[in-house]
Image (spheres, rainbow, N blue to C red):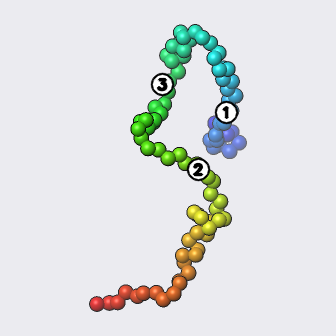
Amino acid sequence: MPSYRHHDFGNLYIQFTVKFPEKNWTQDLSAFDALRKILPAPAVVNVPPAEAITDPAELEDVDGDSKGFGGDAMDEDDEPQGDRVQCASQ
């Protein structure tokens, strides 16, 4: 969007409020066919085969101040511990 005061371009943000229909809003199958023709194709969902071995996992937020990933995790490795081995020239 042009900005007439600064002679520069800005961003236009639009917020939409979408109201989805209730579950089982119609029993008419032709309505679903009409919607499939109008709307884009659904995204392909990767579903593993039934015989695949899967392991469910839960994602957790990482606190940047902790000694885990990120934060000061590398600080404890920076300090020398014990005698260091030097490479000898040949």
Rendering coords of residue 75 (x, y %): 58, 74
Q: Amino acid at mark 3?
A: Ala
Looking at the image, tell me whether mark 1 or mark 2 is earlier in sequence order. 1
Q: Nearer the viewer, mark 2 or mark 3?
A: 2
Looking at the image, tell me whether mark 1 or mark 3 is earlier in sequence order. 1
Rendering coords of residue 54 (x, y %): 47, 44
Q: Amino acid at mark 1?
A: Ile
Residue that badge 2 annotates:
59
19 or 55: nearer the viewer:
55
Specify the quadrant of the image occupied by residue 77: bottom right
The local secondary structure at tag 1 comes to loop
64 or 67: nearer the viewer:
67
The local secondary structure at tag 3 comes to loop
21 or 51: nearer the viewer:
51
Asked if residue 65 lies left or right of residue 29, the reply is right
Q: Amino acid at mark 2?
A: Leu
Q: Which mark is on residue 83?
A: none
Residue that badge 1 annotates:
14
Label 2 crowding class (10 Å Cα cut-off): few <14, some 14-19, many 20+?
few
Answer above or below: position of 70 versus 32: below
Please identify the residue farthest to the left as the structure is shown: 90
Q: Nearer the viewer, mark 1 or mark 2?
A: 2
Report the Cα–Cα distance between label 1 and label 3. 24 Å
Specify the quadrant of the image occupied by residue 4: top right
Label 3 crowding class (10 Å Cα cut-off): few <14, some 14-19, many 20+?
few
Residue that badge 3 annotates:
41
Rendering coords of residue 19 (x, y %): 69, 24
Label 1 crowding class (10 Å Cα cut-off): few <14, some 14-19, many 20+?
few
